[in-house]
Amino acid sequence: MSENLIYTDLNWTESTSPRLQKVTDVQGSTYAEVKVQSLDTNAAASYTSSGKSFCSRTRVAILVAVITLLLVLAVCLILMYHPTASSPRDSKSFSTTYEEALVTLGLVLVTETGRDPWWSGENYKQDHTDCPPSWEKKGKKCYFFSEIQEKKDFNALRKECTDMNSDLVIIDNEEELHYLTSRSSGHYYLLGLKYSTSEKKWKWINNVEHSTNLITIGGDFTDYFCSVIGHGKIETASCSGSSTTQNMCEKAASISERQKES
């Protein structure tokens, strides 16, 4: 009686996938061979080595880029804050250098694109100007409203302003007039507007003649030769001062103003 035998030959080095083969021997017996070959060790090693090499090159490239960026930033900071070994950078020179850099960069952009840089517009200039602490910004000016009610004459109050690198308020336009009228609704503030007895006219401290089209002055014109704004109107006032009059100063807003104060 013939025997049907099944032989299994597992060869892990010849093929990468199972392979079924039907074999008949000389006696007529039939059996099946299943050959399985393992992964080529050389190919696997080559694949692993290639993957590791790619990852290594990527990491090195990223590391070099980061180091280069840090070095560039360090050099920029050194040049910005230490232009020379003997003279430290003050706020004024820093502001000037910053503005010059913007102008230079702006010229390059105009040359390359034919358009003005975005920071050259009037809106940017107004948004990026600043006022010292305790001052209020309106348009291109900074205003200081004193809370002290003390009788001081015109010259003393003006000196308070000049000591703060400012001066008494000069009203230039309707927008400024509306702002100051609203801001002084509960108090009287001294203005930089006086009556010249020699010229017989009202003049601002910058020697510009008062315009009746912009401002109407009310009150006593007998011996009141100074003026105040408050409670919704502009009136004459004594130049000797009053305990109900407070001081008010103005100066132009500046990019470097906060740096000067600090």
Image: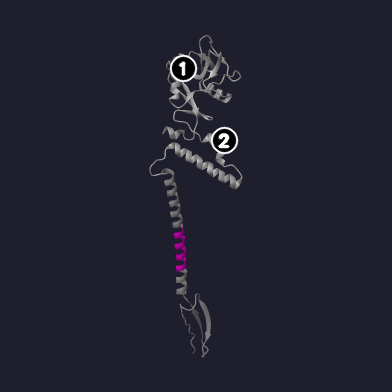
Instruction: Give the image's coloring scheme.
Output: one colour
Query: What percent of the width, then of the height, locates residue 236?
Result: 52, 14
Q: Is residue 54 above or below residue 199?
A: below
Q: Main secondary structure of the magenta part?
A: helix
Local secondary structure at mark 1 = helix
Q: Is residue 63 above or below residue 86?
A: below
Q: Return the residue at label 1.
A: 154
- Tell me which segment is drawn in magenta: 49-61
Return the mark for residue 49: none
Q: Give whichever of 24, 96 is nearer the camera.
A: 96
Q: Is residue 105 above or below residue 262?
A: below
Residue sitting at 43 percent across and 37 percent down? 91
Local secondary structure at mark 2 = helix
Q: Few, some or many C-alpha atoms within 10 Å of disc 2 (few <14, some 14-19, many ≥20)?
A: few
The image quarter in which residue 177 lies: top right
Query: What percent of the width, then of the height, locates residue 135?
Result: 46, 28
